[in-house]
Every structure is written in C-alpha cells, then in structure tokens.
Amino acid sequence: METVALPTASSSAPLALRPLSRAGRPVSLFDLTLEELESRLLAQGEPAFRARQLWHGIYGDLCDGYDAVTTLPLPLRTALADDLPFGTLATVREVATDDGETVKTLYRTFDGQFVETVLMLYPDRATVCVSCQVGCAVGCAFCATGLGGLTRNLTTGEMVEQVVGAARRAAALGRPLTNLVMMGMGEPLHNYAATMKLVGILNDRRGLGFGARRITISTSGVVPRIDALADEPYQVNLAVSLHAPTDDLRTRLVPLNSRYPIAELMAACDRYVAKTGRRISFEYALMAGINDGDDVAQDLGELLRGRLCHVNVIPLNPVDVLPYERPDPAGIERFAGIVRAADIPTTVRYSRGVAIAAACGQLRAEQSAAS
C-alpha cells in the first residue's frame, strides 16, 4: 500500500472563501453552469467568450487554478481569484493500492468536514466514485458512512470538483476519465437538485462532455425521486442498492425500507423501466450468514424474474467497527449461480481497495477519529 500525505493534512482550519451562498456556503467556479458563468462575467463588463475560455480551461485542459488558465488576461484572473474561488476542497490525504489502480482521496471541505472520492482504473475504463453528502441519513447497517448520521448535503461544486480532481489524476496516469458512479458517501436522491445540476455540468459538450450513459446514480430506494429521475432529460443509469429480497431482512439492513418497502420500490422501478426503456442495476452487498443463504438467493431470483435488470453481487468490503464479513469464494459463486439460474444477468463485482479502506466512509472515519 502506498500512502501519500499532502501538505494540507496538517491544518484542520476551515478554508477562508467567498462569496457565500444564502445557505452560508461558498460558491465556487465549479458550482456554475456555462450560462451562469457567462452572466457573471457579463455583469462585470467582460465579454461572454471569456467565460467560454475559462470553461475550456477547467474542463478541457483540466487546469488546477486560475493562474493556469493563460488564455485569460492576468487582471481578469486576479479579479476572479478574489471574487470566485476556483474550488473549495482541500486534499488531506491520498492512498493508493500497490498496483496504483485504485486511488482514494480524502478532502476537507470549507467548513472542516471530510469527504472521500475513489478513482478506479480498469483495462477498458477509468471510473470515479463520487460522494454527495457529508455522512448519510439512510444508516445502512453495514456501511461506515452512516455511523455518524448526516451532517449536510454537498454542493454541486463540491461534487463537480471531485470529478475534475479524478480526471486530473487519471490524466496524470495517462488515462482519460470515462465513467462516474454516484456510489460514494451519501444518498444522491436525498441531494437531488444538486446531483442533477452536476449531471448537467458534466454532460455539457462544451466542457467535459461526459455522456449521461456513462453516469450511474445509485439509490437506497427513495421512491418519489426514482419517479422524478425517470422524467429527467438525461439518460443516466440507475442503480438500486437492494441487499435483500424480503422486507424483514431488508429493513434490518436498509432502514429506509420501512418507509418504502420492497413492493413500492419494485413498482417504482417498473415505472422507471416502462418510461425510459433502460435497464436497472440492483446492487447486492453480500454478507456471510446475513443475506447469502441459498433460500435468500432463490427469493431474490423470484423477486427480479422477468424484470429488465442486472444484479451486481458485491462481496462486502469489511469495516473494522461493524460485525459483518464477506462470504468465502465458494459461497459467493454459489449465491450468484442461484440468481443466474432464475434468468437474471448477474455479475460478481469485488470491491476495489480493501487494503486502503476504500469502502464508503472508512477513510473519513479514520481521519475524524485522529482529529
């Protein structure tokens, strides 16, 4: 394991940034759409093309600060640095697996909170896993993120900045960033407006041009927002964190199930597929002695039989402070085989970065305990 400690790690003071939004949070360059940036510069007496130059600098050239956007005149760069923070996240710590194919970054926010981003390199793609909240209100029993509850939603800018940071890191390794999964800390559909603005900014062809079909939004089952997502113009992928095929077991693992039980969740998924024609992925964190029995696998196959879907069986990435373990390899394959026998496309997807605490919330928890 390689651990890289960066200079910002020694300071825990909140960043001094301006201007502030109505909610008291700094508005950064990454919070703005191109049209919003154009309006801002026009109001300052600058031509609209300056906004497009800046937009290309941050999303095309992946510049890491105003000084690097040399297409802009120096006085404008100076004025922007005083008026509009380039970003609001400070890198605290970065850890990588020995092969360098999984890199986890811990960021400190302007108000001293910690969030995580993971870059995963595969032979055919480079994927970033983005956080959308500080903590999480869902409180899944096996997840480190929810241990301390929800502190706040992240802004659009804080999420976009994670993506751009991962794109820079991938570029430094000679790889383009190709995929985005909203599977980090938090529930994206509890931060719906900011998440959809993120999608719009990334999807803009004048910038990153990130195809919506390369973006996956994960949810623990917020039924009304699944319906809302079906009406959005962006053809993003939907992943549902299922983890159990029956209400009694799922409520133990995913407390949100008591509000939106499986029948309601499946009905919303059916409406989503009928309206969009897109396949849903069901995420299934497999835990030894909890949800990995042959009878549970059969129930899962019956629940999903005939639906346009795919199951990702994810052997649990263990968390030291939680009493859950992954099954042995034979048990994992047996479970997946039973689901496949019900004619459900099923993949076993091992979590990346077990050695670097890459499960959601682990690195944040370590940092918080040390602070």
Image (cartoon, helix red, strand yellow):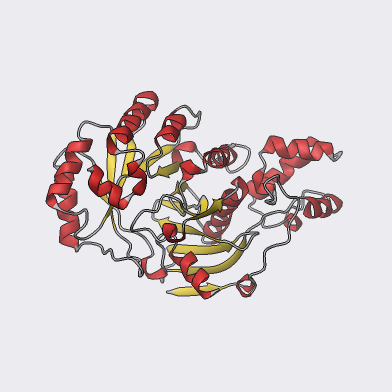
Depth check, front residue: 182 or 76: 182
Residue 286 placement: quadrant: bottom left
Which residue is at a point 47% across and 47% down the rendered structure image?
A: 180
Q: Is residue 270 left or right of residue 16?
A: left
Rendered location of residue 51, percent (x, y)? 74, 41
Q: Quadrant of the C terminus?
A: bottom right
The answer to whether residue 94 of the structure is visible from this angle is: yes
Residue at image position (66%, 56%) is 88
* Horizontal and vertical percent position of residue 330: 15, 60
- Toward which corner of the image does residue 302 lie, by quadrant? top left
On-image quarter of the N terminus = bottom left
Q: x, y (%) of residue 370? A: 52, 75
Name the one closer to the observer, 279 or 100. 279
Q: Residue at x 25, y 32 (%)?
A: 307
Q: Is residue 307 above or below residue 17?
A: above
- Name the residue: 25% across, 62% down: 326
Residue 340 visible in the picture: no
Numbered circles on residues, count: 0
Q: Is residue 125 left or right of residue 23?
A: left
